[in-house]
Amino acid sequence: MSAQAERKTENLPQWKQEEVDELEAIIESYESVGIVGIAGIPSKQLQDMRRDLHGTAELRVSRNTLQVRALEGTGLEDLVDQVEGQVGIIGTNENPFSLYKELEASKTPAPINEGEVAPNDIVIPEGDTGIDPGPFVGELQSIGANARIEDGSIQVMEDSTVLEAGEEVSVDLANVLNELGIEPKEVGLDLRAVVADGVLFDPEDLDIDIEAYESDVQTAAARARNLAINASFPTAATVPTLIAKATGEAKSLGLQAAIEDEDLMPDLVTKADAQLRALAAQIDDEEALPEELQGVEAPAQPAADEGADESADEQNDTETEEAADEDDDDDDDDDAGGGEGLGAMFG
């Protein structure tokens, strides 16, 4: 406790000093400490909220002056400005984001009373109110709802905004909302600020879309991986893909160059067979062909070309027009080679 805080508390009555000591003990026993607003929460509901927080966080409500003394005594002056109105101190060992999310999820709908300020736009939804024809239709119309009697009951003909956020609730509106069972506000612990590891977090800092955040991280990771692969940068995550890519490129080059490698022989034979069949299909005189080649039809696309195209698709980010032209030249050479082979067969 600072010297200034000691001077402030040295003349306190015994019960107040004990309360400050207990508040300080709570503050010092948790990694994250915040201030929550409790205005408008009925006593029973507040007790239920305390029970729900058991094991996750601890809430302590006390006089504002004593809360300020405890915060100053433990070096959390940054939270003092939040001690205004009906508030309490909350402590937890969870991170502030988890605390904020839990408190927001625990809020429940509640009716709004005359004189209160609407936290958001109040809308009476379209549909059957379930109320028999009577003066209530006039009450609905008086607050701005598009209502009339149809099919033996009072109907709201369209979604009707009867009060905008920030405006004060009138007596008539409070009565209509109560009659319809509309609860336009949420009641719960309102986290005003929290300090964790010396950092002050406001609710705006903590209100994040977890799913969107995870999606952004996944997208960034995927883009980083693609960049590393395109740059041939080896990491534990990219090496398997880089090896597979290099293997495919090597195989494609071997096929184009007709390298007589044991692993390439099946593909080279398939390529040669396709080229032979394509050439045989162009010869009009079937008597000039061996029996096994008579009546053959040209394949839709030579197998070797398919392999080359697949390889090109995998490398489309690095393919150039010059490389494509070279591939066309290789195909012409392969066709010529197929003709020579056929000529040799016929002697």
Image (tube, grey):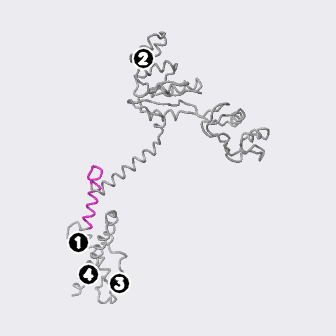
Tell me how far mark 4 sits from mark 2, CA to CA.
Answer: 97 Å
Mark 4 or mark 1: whose residue is earlier in sequence = 1
Secondary structure under badge 2? helix
The label shown at residue 170 is: none
Tell me how far mark 4 sits from mark 3, CA to CA.
Answer: 22 Å
Query: Is 263 in front, or is 336?
Result: 336
Q: Is residue 345 left or right of residue 294?
A: left
Looking at numbered disc 1 in the image, what kind of residue is underneath it? Ala
Looking at numbered disc 2 in the image, what kind of residue is underneath it? Ala
Q: Residue beneath label 1, please? A: 257
Which residue lies most toward the right here? 134
Mark 4 or mark 3: whose residue is earlier in sequence = 3
Residue at 30 percent of width and 73 percent of height:
325
Tell me how far mark 3 sits from mark 1, CA to CA.
Answer: 30 Å
Looking at numbered disc 4 in the image, what kind of residue is underneath it? Ala
Query: Is 301 in front, or is 72?
Result: 72
Q: Residue beneath label 3, please? A: 295
Q: Residue beneath label 4, please? A: 336
The stretch of residues the image draws in magenta is 233-252
Q: Is residue 101 left or right of residue 161?
A: left
Secondary structure under badge 3? loop
Q: Residue beneath label 2, please? A: 5
